[in-house]
Amino acid sequence: MTEFFTALSEYTFLQNAIIACVLASISCGVIGSYIVVKKISFLTGGIAHSVLAGMGMAYFFNASPILGAIIAALVSSILIGWINLRWKEHEDILIAAFWSAGMATGILFLSRTPGYNVDLMSYLFGNILLITGNDLLLMLVLDIVVLGIVMVCYKHFLVSVFDEEFARLHGINTEFFYILLLCLISITIVILIQLVGLILVIALLTLPAATANQYVTSLYKMFFLSAAICAGISISGIAISYEPDLPTGSVIVLLACISYFASVFLKHSLRRKLSA
């Protein structure tokens, strides 16, 4: 661990990684809270894995994979949201179809792209140590977009998430805000891709928020606690994985899982003691 702190003071790539953790945790804490409260992690998984289609097409046409990811995420979130609202009786099958179709389409385009691209592996499995200044700038811009929309629409999101019927009776277009929330989820997924990779992104979106949800009753407080947990887990993951040269994204996700299960165990243990 001493070696990590020494390297942190010397190497820019480690400093960029820590900044990326903080930036990613902001959107992750806010949007992850909505995902947990709304119980739409399965929808989130469908959006996350459909992103590969956009990235595969971007590589095939020699375009920016992040741009492809953003477009694919937004398109899939709108389609998935619309399908979920219109065809509720088949939502699990339809989301699974989007999930599979996105992955399959991405693989097909990648199979026709000449050569093996190392950058793609960093997007699939994460490589936070390769984050550049431009990546940080993009994350900051996306954070501002997410937080700006949440701040403007906070009351509408709040009512739509907790009491859709009440929101409809007061003239709030719940379908619009539902799909808008899915679009914000898609943007957050793109922010987190380089942190833990496309394959593991759903864990970081849900587990810190699920952990925070056990200790607070206010959505606003949940935002802050979830973001703090996410930042703590992410930075700890970098520190732990640095010296033994372990995959940072995997370590971060394992820490998130351990934190969640430890929190659940602690909460139930305390309940038993209080009820005894």
Image (tube, rainbow, N blue to C red):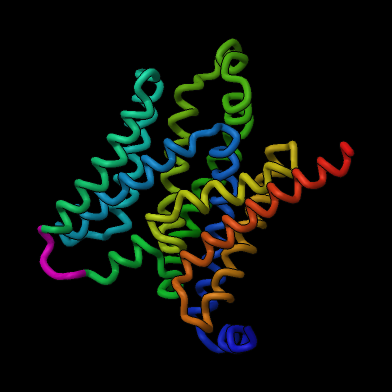
Seen at 75% across and 43% down, the residue is: 268
29, 64: nearer the viewer:
29
Tell me if residue 161 comes above or below residue 265 in the rendering.
Answer: above
The residue sitting at the top extreme is: 169
Seen at 31% across and 66% down, the residue is: 121
Quarter of the image holding residue 73? top left
Q: Is residue 33 left or right of residue 182?
A: right
Seen at 61% across and 51% down, the residue is: 208
The residue sitting at the front extreme is: 276
Seen at 40% across and 21% down, the residue is: 85
Q: Is residue 176 left or right of residue 261?
A: left
228, 150: nearer the viewer:
228
Instruction: Name the dominant secondary structure of the magenta segment.
Output: loop
Q: Is residue 119 a member of the stretch shown in magenta?
A: no
Q: Is residue 7 left or right of residue 113?
A: right
Residue 180, x across and y down, in percent: 45, 33
Residue 16, x across and y down, in percent: 51, 74
Q: Quadrant of the C terminus?
A: top right
Tell me if residue 93 comes above or below residue 211 in the rendering.
Answer: above
Q: Is residue 114 a member of the stretch shown in magenta?
A: yes
Tell me if residue 92 comes above or below residue 233 in the rendering.
Answer: above
Q: Which residues are magenta?
A: 112-116
264, 175: nearer the viewer:
264
Q: Quadrant of the N terminus?
A: bottom right
Quarter of the image holding residue 271? top right
Residue 125, x across and y down, in percent: 37, 63
Q: Is residue 250 left or right of residue 53?
A: right
Quarter of the image holding residue 65? bottom left
| Count of numbered labels shown in the rendering | 0
Tell me if residue 167 comes above or below residue 7 in the rendering.
Answer: above
